Image (cartoon, rainbow, N blue to C red):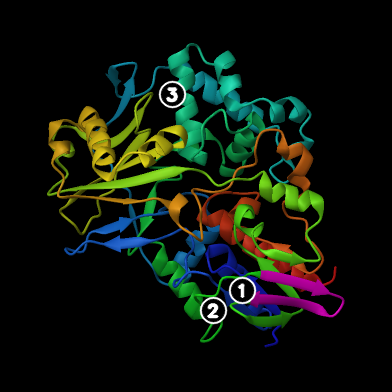
């Protein structure tokens, strides 16, 4: 079966690449391992119509690419629920905002991030030090006390990269802050990255993109097993079949791209990168109640916690549902500890944490819905892949560098809004532009 370009993966990056190529006149086939499009987005509907977004769910200001697609396909958005005051649990005490010194640490990180080129973080003057130092080590020096260091490590490494602060370098954190417009934008609700949600879930946008490609362009249930290239073209193998093309876009996370068999093998540095960019570790749990009782108590449902199994919560209710949805996130070591529990013990630990945040009524949900992306065969973790400590300088230049006829996409390769839907779209369009300039350039 012959085409011009094969795209591996029908997440937002792969779909964006395919659309850009098709609009330029190229023949495109998209191969997707799952039985659906959308990648790391997934919406589940309760019987009464309540929308539960199990994966990526938010869009916000300056995310221009995803906003343009929402408008193009006539979709609607609604603001994330915001009622009452947030909660900060800090060393056994309750606040409505973190103590002031944390703002000073965040401001210092933002200042450092301004010295990082998001297209080449390894070129920063301080990169040798920043790349070998973990975020945890830096916070121990920069934060005013151990509680602040722990809180900020959970908030930044966990809330943004679904990792522990000892697992990522300071340089990785600074790249991510620069890519997303700073800590205020990345951590913010109204006016920030968590401002809006898509009516029906982001999967409806993925479906619209796939439909725009036309019939027979996207093939589901087709995991790519091998990619072989030579002077005549590239051959992509899936399920005992082969597609030949001029070029291929691999639009999956580096950790998954490294599981494909390449002939000839990937260069040592590119293969090394795939081994040094693991996926994040997050557990996302929706506790569903007859009503959002915390609003009557003056709580917004938004919380951040310096300790415990839950790092943060949000009010995930929707305007057209009377149900209350309190969504909790756990990251890194805390997420792994929950995975080791029985389902009953895990539920109990999570509800105990929610009781501490919003009160005793949290112990009586109608249901608890969880989804563990680390157990998803075709994702193996969320939110995204992050370069490990010391690896940006050694392997970072390989992140977007094509290998012959093989081009790389996926949100991890974005320079703006990396890790988000907007970054995924940017990366797909960039890979398509590389091919359109010249398949052999």
Instruction: Of the two numbered discs 2 and 3 on the same chain, state the one appearing first in sequence.
Output: 3
Q: Secondary structure at mark 2?
A: strand
Q: Is residue 379 above or below residue 162?
A: below
Q: Which residues are magenta?
A: 226-237
Quarter occupied by the C terminus:
bottom right
For discs 1 and 2, the disc positioned in front in the rendered view? 2
Identify the residue position indicated by label 1 in the image.
18
CB contact under 8 Å: marks 1 and 2: yes
Identify the residue position indicated by label 2 in the image.
218
Near mark 3 (Cα within 10 A), the count class, few <14, some 14-19 or many ≥20, is: many
Q: Which mark is residue 151?
A: 3
Q: Residue 172 location in percent, x, y?
A: 63, 36
Q: Residue 354 location in percent, x, y?
A: 24, 34
Q: Secondary structure at mark 3?
A: helix
Q: How many marks?
A: 3
Instruction: Of the two numbered discs 1 and 2 on the same chain, state the one appearing first in sequence.
Output: 1
């Amino acid at each position: 079966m012959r085409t011009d370009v094969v795209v591996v993966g029908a997440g937002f990056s792969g779909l964006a690449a395919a659309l850009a190529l098709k609009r330029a006149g190229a023949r495109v086939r998209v191969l997707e391992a799952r039985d659906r499009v959308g990648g790391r987005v997934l919406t589940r509907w309760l019987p009464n119509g309540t929308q539960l977004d199990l994966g990526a769910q938010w869009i916000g200001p300056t995310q221009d690419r995803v906003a343009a697609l929402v408008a193009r396909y006539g979709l609607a958005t609604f603001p994330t629920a915001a009622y009452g005051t947030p909660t900060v649990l800090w060393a056994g005490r309750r606040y409505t905002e973190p103590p002031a010194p944390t703002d000073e640490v965040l401001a210092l990180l933002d200042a450092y991030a301004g010295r990082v080129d998001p297209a080449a973080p390894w070129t920063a003057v301080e990169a040798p030090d920043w790349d070998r130092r973990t975020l945890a080590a830096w916070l121990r020096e920069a934060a005013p006390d151990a509680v602040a260091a722990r809180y900020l490590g959970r908030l930044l490494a966990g809330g943004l990269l679904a990792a522990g602060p000892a697992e990522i370098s300071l340089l990785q954190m600074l790249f991510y802050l620069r890519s997303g417009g700073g800590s205020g934008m990345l951590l913010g609700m109204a006016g920030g990255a968590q401002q809006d949600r898509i009516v029906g879930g982001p999967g409806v946008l993925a479906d619209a993109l796939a439909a725009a490609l036309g019939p027979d362009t996207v093939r589901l249930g087709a995991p790519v097993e091998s990619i072989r290239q030579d002077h005549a073209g590239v051959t992509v193998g899936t399920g005992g079949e082969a597609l030949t093309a001029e070029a291929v876009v691999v639009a999956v996370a580096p950790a998954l791209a490294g599981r494909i068999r390449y002939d000839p093998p990937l260069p040592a540095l590119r293969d090394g990168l795939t081994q040094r960019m693991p996926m994040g570790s997050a557990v996302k749990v929706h506790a569903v109640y007859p009503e959002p009782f915390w609003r009557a108590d003056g709580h917004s449902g938004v919380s951040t916690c310096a300790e415990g199994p839950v790092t943060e919560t949000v009010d995930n209710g929707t305007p057209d549902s009377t149900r209350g949805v309190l969504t909790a996130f756990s990251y890194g070591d805390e997420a792994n500890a929950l995975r080791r529990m029985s389902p009953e013990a895990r539920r109990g630990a999570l509800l105990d944490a929610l009781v501490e945040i919003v009160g005793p009524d949290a112990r009586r949900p109608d249901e608890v819905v969880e989804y563990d992306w680390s157990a998803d065969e075709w994702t193996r973790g969320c939110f995204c892949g992050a370069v490990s400590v010391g690896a940006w300088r050694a392997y970072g230049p390989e992140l977007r560098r094509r290998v012959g006829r093989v081009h790389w996409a996926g949100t991890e390769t974005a320079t703006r809004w990396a890790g988000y839907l907007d970054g995924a779209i940017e990366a797909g369009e960039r890979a398509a532009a590389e091919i359109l300039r010249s398949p052999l350039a």
